[in-house]
Amino acid sequence: MAQQTLLQASFGTQSLLTKLLAVVGGSAVIALGAQVSVPMLPVPMTLQTLAVLMVGLVAGSRLGAAAVLTYLAEGAMGLPVFSNGAAGAAYLFGPTGGFLIGFVAMAYAAGLLAERGVARGFLGTALGVAAISALLYVPGLIWLTAVTPLDLGGAVSRGMLPFLAGDLVKSVIAALIVTGAWTTLRARRG
């Protein structure tokens, strides 16, 4: 059974304009998250994954995925939305390409958590987004081994292990924000 997302609960029936603003606004949130970056090679550490999760959790599966696709299109067209202001279609084929494409599925899956009512409580949200974050490594590491000289072990040690603790922290932050938003929304409605 489908539940309301935070966006739907906050703004009621969604008009085309609301959906458009959610997609464009979501892509802007992701772009901002990409700019909060710790340079690492071959994959920088950013707040982008937290932003992608939040967009999916708030907007839902379809709008969340559409926001990520919009973000990727903006970057491919030359807008400086990727990490450290990078832009261009070639960036999608670089070492981070698998992670960038995986963000579409990540936002969709986070949105499904919200639509299924799992992302209402702290524990369900934190565990759900931690699992989704772990799944992002599948396309990310596959792509990283395909476009760099790294073998799978090297890709894991350079493209996954340094990020695991941050992923857990981001999962807790996402859960705190979402459960806090639901609590606030319920309190305002009395």
Image: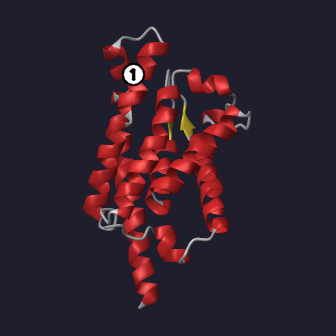
Q: Quadrant of residue 182?
A: bottom left
On-image quarter of the C terminus: bottom left
Does residue 157 appear to the left or right of 53 in the view shown? left
| Residue 173 % position (x, y) | 40, 56
| Residue 149 % position (x, y) | 45, 8
Does residue 149 appear to the left or right of 29 in the view shown? left
Disc count in the image? 1
**Within-10-Å neighbours for mark 1: few <14, some 14–19, many 20+:** some
| Residue 55 % position (x, y) | 51, 55
- Residue at 64% x, 66% y is 16
Q: Quadrant of residue 178?
A: bottom left
The three-letter code of the residue at mark 1 reads Ile
- Residue at 50% x, 21% y is 41
Does residue 177 appear to the left or right of 79 in the view shown? left
Residue bearing mark 1: 142
In the rendered image, the vertical position of residue 9 relative to residue 37, given as above or below: below
On-image quarter of the N terminus: bottom left
Does residue 171 appear to the left or right of 31 in the view shown? left
- Please indicate, yes or no, whether residue 175 appears anywhere in the rendered image: no
User: Looking at this rendering, what residue extends furthest in the right direction?
Assistant: 78
User: Looking at this rendering, what residue extends furthest in the top direction?
Assistant: 149
In the rendered image, the vertical position of residue 66 relative to residue 177, given as above or below: above
- Residue at 50% x, 71% y is 8
Question: Residue 42 or 129: which is nearer the viewer?
Answer: 129
- Residue at 52% x, 27% y is 97
| Residue 43 % position (x, y) | 49, 26
